[in-house]
Amino acid sequence: MTESGGDGWRVVSTQNCVLGSVIHDFNATSLSHLSLQLGDSVHILEECGGWYRGTLLKNRLTGIFPASFIHLRTAAPLSLGTKDAPHSLDPFDQELSIVLPQWRHLLLHKYYVERHEHFGKLHEAVMEVLSIRKQLQTRSLSLDEQRKIRHRAAYLVDWGNKTMSLPLTPRNDAKEVIDERSVSLVDLYRMHQQAAQEVVKGDAAGRKVSVMTTSANRRGTDVTEKLHHLYFRLCNFEGLAQGECELHVSLYDVRDDMFFSERYVVKYDKNGEPTGYGGADNIRCIFSDLSTFDLQRKEAYLVFHVIRIGDMMVDHKVSKEVNLYRRPYACAVFPIEGMLHKQLVPQSEAEVHTSELFQCSSEHDFYNMHLSLIKKQTGSFKSLLSRVHFSVQPFHGLLSTVREVYPYLFQKSIPVCRKLGFPEVMMPGDTRNDIYVSLVSGDFKLKDNKTAEKNMECQVSVILSDGTLLTDCISPGTSLDNVSVYKSLVVRHTNTPQWGETIKLDISLEKFHSAHVRFCAFHRSTNKKGFNSFMLAFMPLIHAKGMALADDEYSLIVYKCDASLLGNLDPSHYLHLPWNGSDELIPSSALPRTMASSKILRMKARTVICSTKLTQNYDLMMFLKWRQCPDLLRESLQGLMAISGYEVVKFLQDTLDALFAILSEHSEQCGQLVFQCLVYIIKLLNETKFENFRSVLDSYIENHFSGVELYLNLIHELRQSLHSAHESTAVDQRYIRTVQSLQYIFRFIVTSRLLHARTEKQQDDASFRNDLIGVFDSFVAILEQDKSNNTALQAALLQSFPTIFQEVLQVLQPADFSRVIQRILDCVPSNRLNNQKLHCISRIVSNDLWHHESARTILLPTITHQLKSLMQQGELEAAKCLDIHGDILRVLKRNDVGAVSGNVTVLAKSFLLTFMRYVGQRGKLTQTATAATLFSSLLDLMNESHYRQFLDDFEGWEKAEEFLTECFGSFCKFLTKSPFAEDWTSMQVAVTSVFLRAAKSLSAPMQEQLHQHGKFSVELWRSLLTLYCDLACVPALQFETLSTAQHNNYLTKYGDIRVEASKEVVSLWQQLGMTRKMSFVPSLCGTFLKISLLKQCEVRKLVIPLFVDMISCELATTGDFQQMVSELVDKLDDLVSVQEMGDNEYKEHMHTIMEECCQRNPALRAADGMEFVDYSTTLLERLLDLRNIPDGDEHIIQRMQAIVNLMQYYKQMQREAMYIRYIYRLAKLHLKVHNYAEAAFTLLRHAKILKWEDVPLVGEQCDFPDLPAAKTELELKIHLYKMIIDYFDKAKVYEEAIPLCKELAEQYELVTFQYRDLIPIYRRIADLFSKIVDEVRPINEFFRVGFYGTKAPSFMKGKQYIFRGREFQHVSDFTHYLLESFPSASILKFNTEPDAEYEYKEGMFIQLAKVEPNSPSNELLQAAMAGSQLPAFNVDSFTLNRPVQKGGKGFSNMWIERTVYTTDMTLPSILHWVPVNHRHTVEISPLSNAVESMVMKNREIRERTTGAENNSEQLNPLSMILNGVIDAAVMGGLAVYEEAFLTKEYLAGHPDEEKSVERLKELIKEQVSVLGDGLTVHARIAPPDVRPLHDKMESGYADMQQKYCPESAAVRARAVTMSFSPSPSLTSLDVTKPATNGTDNSSSLVVSPSSARRSTFSVGAPPGVGSKAKKGSAGTGLAMMSLMMMGHSDVPKPVAGEKSTAKAKSKTSTSDRVNTKLLSIILNVGLILNLKFAANELMIL
């Protein structure tokens, strides 16, 4: 109800507080909205137009939200201002309100983003939980249904938590969340264990369980759940025959070829409407009493028979005068295998099945038609194209319970089709007297009968011996009214009809013995009314011996009778006649004249009797009627033990009544025999096949047994049997069966005694007690015997003895009975019957007896003694003993079991050390976890007095110290590696809380010893301090990872254990003086550091000052605090980087607190304490920088830089071990991304630290791929050098590998004399030089990169770096690479320095630009490598040019702003980037820029020319540069320089740049010259398809030469017309030996100008070259041509004759050529020194 409020809002009534559950997320879009998450709970206050105003329970925020997002429910009134408000909700809702938001966050932000494989399953689990929650909130389910789906929901929640690594929730057997403090640790452990096992068993998303899940999933212990039922509902029937018809439905088993249920019959009128069912929707029935065996039937079917009711033929007209016959029509079958295992769903959701109807062509086959359909033998059948539509669903349990649980299915009466046979369980009070008679077949064909086949109908009736017809005693089928006469099917034209019909007879017991079944068969004619004769058969229901007729198929004798007898047929006329085919037939002459018999006239009928009052067994009948034959009593009793067990259990109540009556009246005569019969019956019920009937016996004892004085007889007979067993020398199974039956024997005894107590006012309790004690004395006598032949009896006795506890406690006091049990346990010989003793003890401590304080006081010492001995026998026995201890401790935790202090003392003395050592030994995980639980549970029960008493029992404090040290060590082992699963948070928190309390109690005597006696043990105090730190660091206590609700829940229950432990640490530390503290400096530094790194501010404030105190102690003792510094650095690195502890908040706390402490300490201030604080803070900052970088290759730049920062720090702090560790970590990252050069430089850092000495390695060798293990520094250094050389080789940085090879060679040659190892080293050096000379290496580009913005990495923000690009990585590729590494960054589009605002601007910004390396100037090296691309190595200076316009537009005003960046390290290095250390900017004038450009371009042309000359494959680069320069010159390229700088006006305006102008002119002429050289080489090596391009370049070059160098144009023209022969290389240098002609005998060296640029050193003339060059020789001609090409116009020109002579000489002097490369070097020296006369001198020589 609501009440009107203001502004259209209506106030919700507070009579019933309206709560709601959020079913969908809602995000607030205005200030008045309240954001909601799935699973939240809200209190509805007001409503208006589809909106609610309410309060969110989890944070008390109030706002409005859509009503469609809320599912309403009503709860008790609650106050939103109280903490207990959420507890008024349903516990299941409370749990989901915590769990679902957690799941939602993880699913959206982790599993969905990561495309986790479990996302789909988890999503399905969430949806199913929500569906269950919605159905629970509808409150329309029964209690049983709610229980079942809550179990399912609990399983789903546990599975989801397990999958997402969330804490497992402890639950009780009802699957309700429990308060951990309300149960013992043993119970808590078992709850976790059970939940974990259930999660492992199944997959939540793989098993779809409906909300109507039945108890089929829980079958096993409850006997009533072994009863099963099948709910059948007819949805539609299309197979209606013409006229009236019946649909028969029954269950059939193919293997047994039998119907095993009654028939459900549905009648339809001639209009096709069902009659008497209240509508077509109400046609349903229950097939009840099905057994477990029926569930397992492999070939069970539903069979549908359609019976037509009408005339003999379908086309005959039916009139009132004509009888209506039951005629075969159609049949259908449907398999139901597995349907009984399905789960129940709402009726509207039930699956509808369909079965097709068939009609048989021959009526004779109708009886067996269903079997043919099952076997698919349908060839002779006709499909009616009609179907039966139906649904079936299973139920389990008692039918009465099913009616209560599912009342909506039983709103109207529903027919019950019972099983043809007894159910699996017959409960007391269940009476049944059903007689089933099946009409099988008939044979009515006489031998001499020549007439046509008849249409036979059989009518069945039940007649008493006096001829009375029993009316309405025949049931044709369930749902139909009983009839007096049943008419069978009429099978047309056959004298041997097969009917296959079953009817049920409903006959009272009074009339049963005088009743018989009469069968009358008639011929039904289609033309005549009436008949001349009929066939008669009969079947009595009682055997001649008096018992009921046995279940069997009988061949009945058929008598032919005259029609006149039908009206007055007296049973006296035929009852004396034979009725069964096995009886001797009476001749017809002895029969009345109106009757006749024949051997060939037979009829078959089958009977099944399901009766709890009528037995078919003669011996059982005689036993039940023992009063009628008292002389045969002993024989009857002996016969009872020979009767089939099935017969006995069917008549269990009657049998027991008879036995106890005999025992009461004839105890002296038959007492022992009756006792044996009773044992026999109990033994039957102990068998598995009859275990279902134990509940029948239980019910009998509770409700029907009435033997008031029988306890005396039973005790007497039991003692006599036990005495005989004790005296027996052989194994007798009778005695074993007797002790196995003790449970029920004692139940009868005790029940009888209690009945006697109710009826008798004066009781002889002492006598009864003495009798019982006598029985127990017999037990002791048997168990004391040490005979091998008695072991089986003793074992059976120990197994059965615990079963009598509950009964005996009703008549004996717990203390008295405990003494009996104590005697029995003590009397068993040691090392015998261990399993039985363990079983007996287990049953003792799990019995209600154990709840009595007096019983525990007596029994506990005995039990502990036994368990202590049994735990040593083996692992199996030890495991059982641990379970028993758990049962003991869980009882002691209860509040309703009296005082337990004494029991705890006994247990502590006996088992505290045992449990503690189990925890420390770390055996099997399960046993360790169990032992840890027992240890914790025992500690939980102990108080201060227990601990002190336990310690006082040691002989002296030294022994107590040993125990405490071991105990604290066991605690630490448990805490650092818990045997419990990680998600057992509740268990771990509870155990940790117990350990904290125990540590406080155990440490109190320690502190007293310190203060009162001065006793101090370093190891003991160290273990205690370590324990407290480990307690605080338990992962389960780090509640920050949990939800707020879970966090608050644990804090409310246990407080913050971390703070308590930290306080204890500080308290203990403060009790120690400086001298004692030094015992723990610096060893406990890491321990204290670990606890201080916890995410708990109070803990940090408590513990961080301890570091300063430790530093002060060391400073006061040693004068410095280097040990603390060293330890702190080592531990901080491990805890932060490896264990991922600490955060930026901790860094601030650490700096602030330590700084304050140092400020207060003058000694620390004077000893650079503040510097230490800064160093520590810096280290922590760098460690956090590295750790906070996300995983993934995209963040590798940040990770590498952070590692290098740490390396620099450790190098500065001289922490060599840490420095080396990060060297290898960085090298691994380089290898991961194939940075081989950087990996080599990184490893070289360690290699340089190692010595060339054979000394052992200090510390462990770092793990690195492919690095062999080494024992000495020399060995490791050699391994590293070889690896580094390989990496430099892979990276093509050959220049860095050669010095390392030489260093290795020096070691092998001069130190270790390993000459064999020199061979591969020198080969490697030669190979590296060869690669330098011959291999074309890609040029790496360099980039300046700056990082700006608030989201840039803190250690890179505001800094600029020079990056060395990878091979073939240009600007666009490098930009993409940066954006991959920094996905959130934006690229700045300008090249100028960013404004200061970018450093603080939101986001991340990257500025990059290509820079040119300023390689070290080495002209000799450059000249020697001319024609090869020399990569930039060891570069630490880089240039960035930016054009700037000054004074107007045009080239003459184009200035260059040149910024030079210098770095501390050269590239390549340990990173492929280095930070910029310094930069300066200069401006370059336009003329200077032009000069530089010309110099660079000329150099590039020369290099390309030489490269193509040496390798024709380099033609394309040469073609490109030549074409580019010539085209630019022709199109006005050089004209730009000319117009800008080579004018009088420019010189007039810039007189100080005259030399630069002249230099520019020279460079233009030089460019013309080098272009000519290039064209010459191009002409010689260019293929024909490139000739057009070459001709075009020649034409352009001619114009260019004519314009800028006209004096060399004629020389060029002549040189082109001379056209060198293409076969010899232009670079070939020939040293010829011309004929002696009187000239100077010296060598003639001919060197091409282009080859004269490839050397960096000079040598003399080759040996053996001394002959004079003939004037006009080829050498001279080539030299002159070379000099002319170099620009020497004064060289004499050769004549034509000389030219031909030179060619001839060149061909004949091949054998005298020398290495052209060396001679090239000679001329190169002159060129390098700019000596133009060098060529002339060489030519003269």
Image: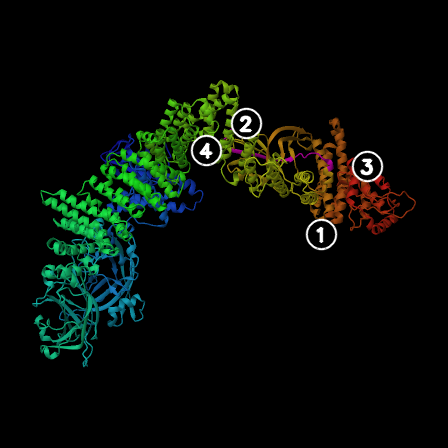
| Label 4 residue SS | loop
Amino acid bearing label 3: Lys
Q: CA distance from mark 2 to mark 3?
A: 56 Å
Q: CA distance from mark 4 to mark 2?
A: 35 Å
Q: Pinpoint residue 792: horizontal percent, then vertical percent.
A: 27, 52
Q: Nearer the viewer, mark 1 or mark 3?
A: 3
Look at the numbered discs 1 and 2 and tell me whether their residues touch, using CB distance below 8 Å: no
Determine if residue 343 is in view.
yes
Q: Which residues are magenta?
A: 1398-1420
**Total labels drawn:** 4
Residue 1249 lies in what quarter of the image? top right
Q: CA distance from mark 1 to mark 2?
A: 59 Å
The residue beneath circle 3 is 1732
- Magenta region includes residue 848: no
The residue beneath circle 1 is 1585
Q: Nearer the viewer, residue 604 or 1652?
A: 604
| Labelled disc at residue 1396 | 2
Determine if residue 1530 is in view.
no
Label located before the other in sequence (1 or 2): 2
The residue beneath circle 4 is 1141
Q: CA distance from mark 1 to mark 4?
A: 71 Å
Q: Nearer the viewer, mark 1 or mark 4?
A: 4
